[in-house]
Amino acid sequence: MSATLTPPAAAPPTPDQPGRDGPGRSIASIPRWAWALGVVVLWVGIWALTKGTDTLALAGREHTDVQTSLGRFRDDVLAGRADNPVIQLTYDLGAWFTSVVDWLQRMLSVPDFPRPVPQVGWLGVTAVATWVGLAVAGWRIAVLVAASFVSFGVFGYWSEAIDLLIVTFVAVGVSVLIGMPLAVLVGTGNRAVNAVTNTVLDIFQTMPTFVYLLPIVLFFGIGAAGAVVCTLVYALPPIIRIAGHGIRNVSTTTIEATDSAGQTWWQRLTKVQLPMARKTIVVGLNQTIMAALSMATIASYVDGPGLGQPVLDALVKNDVGGAFVPGALIVVMAVMLDRSTTAASEYSEMAARGGLDLRLRRIVLAAAAVPVLVALHLSRTYPWAAELDDPGWTPKVADAVDGFFEWFTDTFRDATQAFKDLVSAVLLNPLQSLLSESPWWLAGGAILALAFVVGGLRAVAPTVVCLGGLLYFGLWHDAMVTLNMTLVGTVLVMLLAVVLGVAMARSRAVDVVLRPTLDAGQTIPPFVYLIPVLALFGPTRFTAIVAGVVYAAPVAIKLVADGVRAVSPSTIEAGRSTGSTRWQEIVKVQLPMARASLVLAANQGLLYVLAMAVIGGLVGAGALGYDVVLGFARSEEWGKGAAAGISIVLLGIMVDRIARAAAHRSGAPAAR
Amino acid sequence: MSVATEKETAAATSAESALSVRNLWKIFGPRADRIIGTPDAQLSRAELKAKTGCVAGVKDVSFEVAPGEVFVVMGLSGSGKSTLVRCLTRLIEPTAGSVLIDGIDVTTASDAQLRDLRRNRVSMVFQHFGLLPHRQVIDNIAYGLEIRGMKKKERRAKAEEVVSLVGLDGFSHSYPDQLSGGMQQRVGLARALAGDPSILLFDEPFSALDPLIRRDMQNEVIRLHRDLRKTMVFITHDLQEALKLGDRILIMRDGEIVQIGRPDEVVGAPVDDYVRDFVSEVPRSHVLTLKWVMREPRPDDSMDGPVMSCDTIVRQAAKAALASEHPVRVVEGDRVIGIVDDDAILRVVVAEEEAHQ
Ligand SMILES: Nc1ncnc2c1ncn2[C@@H]1O[C@H](COP(=O)(O)OP(=O)(O)OP(=O)(O)O)[C@@H](O)[C@H]1O
Ligand SMILES: [Mg+2]
């Protein structure tokens, strides 16, 4: 997950030196970019002659054989619900999740028949949540929690917000139950165990979130079951990876010293490894919660309950005002969860270190429990405490937001339009024609050649496999369109990342201002980014690209900033002593030496933008993302949707492998 | 000493030994166990590494430690000291050979027996302390007692006694990172002592400390040894420390024993250039006894000089010897075995002065 990336150390300065296993070795004097340029020139040349032939574009309702057989596979699975034990098991699991969520909903968020309201009303839930906040993280967090819950109520999204929390926490609970034993295995197991889990987790994390949905819904059903399962699958890797890392990195001296006292395996785990890794484990938990929240919102695509639904409904109708309030509440929830888990870890550290007066704390908590119990009772007895009267703010806010965006787009229409036109004319359209109007053999060959140039031999095999897969699943044309959006988005991300990253690295002030914003940006579920961007650019592919850029920028900027800052000051000083200008210093010293971070940032940028380009299929981005959405909506399109999902994975793996190979050649550790 | 006689003495003494190590091997690397017994085992470390990819950490090491003895193992970095001491309680699994502690065969012990041994008989102090950062000093010290299943009150009371033994009064409720390095190592020492083991193992416990603190801690160990009379195996690469603490010293190189002997034997009769190099910086008058500088008595020797035991250290004898007109008569029991004249003393002391200029 993005926040856990370790910035790579600055690579040794090897600008202009060809890589170890690339084409540069044979003809050492020609730099890599010249090779790439050569490939592109050749590509354009052949494209001009063959344009429009063999593009493999599929018409709206057309299916290839592979897609048809995927559709048949789905029908078989559905038919097998009666007698296939595997499918029965998954459906039973799904039903179990549904009943848990259902029960919690009747307790907290929906009327529990014959009661006209849930068992516990808003006042009771808010009071209990506030008390929990007070107990685990102190009064500041308690205030934050109370304010957040009240805001869910007064804006009229109480039950949706609580549903989102329910799905998130059921998924997080199961993730922890499954993830902690696996983390212990990763942390204490041998190298082979580690290598296997790492590879599996890598593949999971390369997959854009959206892709999980189709197969999971097939096996677990839609609604709460599908939402919990895909949320839990998405939320599992961070806790395994981060907690496992923490356990593995417990000082070997301490383990040896305590082993020498004669402890058992279990004593070592519970008294040494877990307590010493506690901080890291909490970071993993925080990441897992944040991942769960972001996936739980996206699960609204498969009818998952929660705040994602009103956002999605509004987005489909292009109703920015309507999406704004639930979107903002998702952000409120993200901030609340992030701040609470972080503060809880600091607070418990303080308590363990004797920094808190434990007796006083117990008294305060006991005293605070009294009004909480009263509130609980009231919320079960009196309608006013069970359900908050909607003061009707939401429509007003929606109107205001609509008004604002109308004014904004009117006023800045020229500017946004000019930006859109510029990017379209300079990047988007030419690249799109090149990628999607080339015959498949030309585009494929060119991609392969470029992969070899930037990534060396190591990139060739995965590229061949992925391109072959794209061909096989029959959505080559759509894949090229999605790839185009991804590449253009990544170029924009890198522009931002280099400019802002260098500024942050060179100026403390910029860093102090920007970093908290970026940190906050990273906690917001990506889905929400679509809302303001949609307001600015309408339902076009441009919206998906810009939302992707906004989503990917924080990670990329931070990676570049950390990489540039890691360039040793003595090298910079040496440069300065030769009288280089500031521009020369940046271009000739800092950026080349931070090359590894730049590559890593580009890799992350690619994956993030790809994820967004897919989610944006719904708001005009078309191509693979749209195919997937259509697969949800119409059963006869399921096969095509599944093929699109697999194609997205293949695209993701391909760009990731090429970027990793490039990173490897510039001496950077592989991206996570 | 021939191999045969060494074996015999080992067999004869192991009954009374606190610790007895026989033909111990540790080879790191794949299929290490296949190497022992083949001609490859005789290769030097570098050759073995080149040929098989394995590293011989400990090579055919045998020695005995008597109860109450302080046995020092020293050698350059990488000579296999840490590996050796970890093999004693199987923190590293030995490849071959046997280790007997209080007559119990450690190498064949079951997991439960091994835990019992680590809990009750042998404790270890580590170079980098290895304390638990999330526990107070008192709970770090009580850790060994805790995993034995002792009740909290009882173990804390017991740990509190050890706290004052190592001079940490008043710091029981601090956390390790609030203490200086020297104090942290006192905690390490206290933790090792809390279980009242019969053997203490030290792996370079003071090399991370600065010189003054190190001297304090050495004196602390000497005091504890005097008071508690525990058997100690002490790893160091500092010869001064070895000579100061050790009853006997084992010198290792590339995993093999080069020499075992009392401090004066090592300094007085180094077996080869490696050991000679090691001891060349040592002030010989501080280590050598009169036995090493005396000559055969001759009939014309004066019989009026002072009488001294052959175990007297030269430096301590020097003043009286130089003050007297007559040469010193060196005795073992009540038999005169040699004569030390002013020249012999000056040779040792002056040679040292020159060496230090
Ligand atoms: N786990 C291991 N795998 C492979 N080789 C090892 C391992 N542990 C130690 N060695 C090798 O065994 C040799 C002895 O190492 P050891 O740590 O025992 O030396 P040492 O005498 O304690 O050195 P120092 O004074 O630096 O602590 C070294 O050459 C080391 O490289
Ligand atoms: Mg060592």
Image (spheres, grey):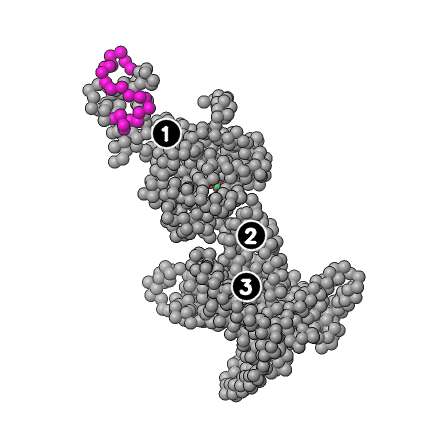
Asked which secondary structure carries label 1, the reply is helix
The N terminus of chain A - image quarter:
bottom right
Is residue B304 covered in magenta? yes
Q: Which mark is residue A187?
A: 2
Q: Estimate the x, y position of residue A410 in percent, counting from the top left.
A: 52, 88
Image quadrant in which you'd find residue A537: bottom right
In this rendering, is residue A534 above or below B210? below
For the point 56% across and 36% down, the residue is B113
- Mark 1 vs ligand 1: CB under 8 Å? no
From the image, give the main secondary structure of the stretch colored magenta: loop
* Location of residue A82 (image quadrant): bottom right
Task: Locate residue A213: give its quadrant.
Answer: bottom right
Q: Are marks 3 and 1 in contact (CB under 8 Å)?
A: no
Residue B347 appears in the picture as rendered: no
Q: Secondary structure at mark 2?
A: helix
Whether residue A528 sits left or right of residue B130 in the image: it is: right
Query: Which residue is tagged 3?
Result: A287
* Three-letter amino acid code of the residue under disc 1: Pro
Distance from disc 2 to disc 1, alpha carbons, whole Å, reads 45 Å
Residue type, numbered disc 3: Gln
Position of the C terminus of chain A, as image quadrant, is bottom right
